[in-house]
Image (tube, rainbow, N blue to C red):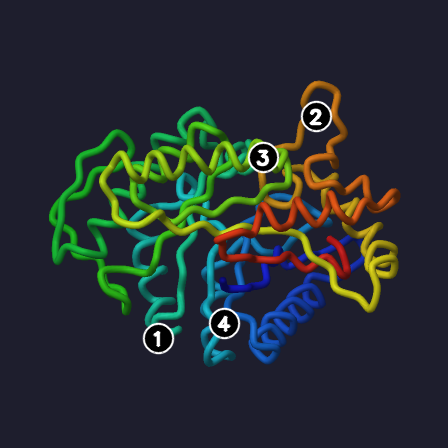
Amino acid sequence: MEFGLFTEFEAPAGMSHATAFDESLAQMKAAEALGLDAVWLAEIHFQKDRSVLSSPLVVAAALAACTQRIKIGIAVQVLPLSHPLRLAEDVATVDHLSKGRLEFGIGRSGLPGHYQGFNIPYSESRERFLETLEILTKAWTQDRFSHEGKYFQFRDVCAMPKPYQKPHPPIRMAATTEETYPLVGRMGLPIFVAPRTISISDLKRFIVGYHEGWAAAGHAGRGDIAVSMPVYVAEGERQAREEAEASTMHFFRLPGGGGGPPARPARGASLLEPLGLDELRQPDPARTGAHVHAALRGARCATPDLTTGP
């Protein structure tokens, strides 16, 4: 199991953007000094008083220059919002600057506001995602290539540079909806899940779909699962709950619940119930512990920094 730190480069109301960058970059450097395996960078657009991390690959390049060992992950690049050839070049460049420490997480984002801002219909997100991924793979693995698709057409282009890692940086695909899990499995890709807006029981059921899709496509092994879970460490349980409560509650009430789709209650349930966050006020250690154990079993783990709150 690997442990990493997930960040959105929080910029709460009243904090200057310069301070937001300084503090988050310091956290990323500290993650390496503390021996964590990876840092994971979100992609957030158009959300004032939440985040300044709209260009994760630019930040990844900066981290490549000021760290030596830690993996640098993108969690996740919203593929439908990017030009695929430019993205292929940028990703390969960061892969070289980091000497192969880049891990490339990809997704569609469940926040329609991202698409509205770029004037791209959200209804096109799946088709654009798949076409962009196809172009990225061609650009990284073929000397020259052509492409004739619905949204992009290229004639005999040579994307440069080619990635440092061969054939390309590890690709990890985010999944939030049930139907996406078997799709990722069939594609043979590692999966990235953030169980913040679904119950743990649903997550366990969705993961079965990932394994079934993986096996049906004939891939060896059982796949690779990364889980992003909120974790706060303190001297005692009560201290941890009290110190993190305000920040955590604020984080989960933001649009998207910290990176996933917009949170909507199911059958009248609390928005915070899936992860047992209501237990911050009425703790049940056995239930909370079972949630975490079930989610982390056999997975990598990225833990968001909730100590200051967005």
Residue located beneath label 4 in the image: 62
Residue drawn where x is 35% and y is 46% of the image: 83
Q: Is residue 69 left or right of residue 189?
A: right
Pick the front one: 19 or 297 = 297
Q: Quadrant of residue 158?
A: bottom left
Mark sitting on residue 265: 2
The single residue placed furthest to the top in the displayed view is 267
Q: Is residue 121 left or right of residue 183?
A: right
Q: Which residue is mark 1?
A: 99
Residue at the image position 36 percent from the left and 60 percent from the top: 91
Residue plotted at (11% across, 49% down): 156
Mark 2 or mark 4, which has the lower sequence index? 4
**Structural crowding at the residue carrying mark 4, measured as other residues with C-alpha within 10 Å and reported as few (<14), some (14–19) or many (≥20):** some
Badge 4 vs badge 1, beta-carbon distance below 8 Å: no
Residue indicated by mark 3: 261
Q: Tag 2, which secondary structure?
A: loop
* Disc 3 residue type (three-letter): Pro
For the residues marked 1 and 2, what is the alpha-carbon distance in whole angstroms?
A: 44 Å
Look at the picture and state if 34 lies above or below 158.
below
Residue in front for this viewpoint, 16 or 77? 77
Q: Secondary structure at mark 1?
A: loop
Amino acid on which the number 2 mark rests in the picture: Pro
Secondary structure beneath label 3: loop
**Element carrying mark 4:** helix
Q: Nearer the viewer, mark 2 or mark 4?
A: 2
- Above or below for 308 versus 108: below
Q: CA distance from mark 3 to mark 2?
A: 12 Å
Q: CA distance from mark 3 to mark 4?
A: 28 Å
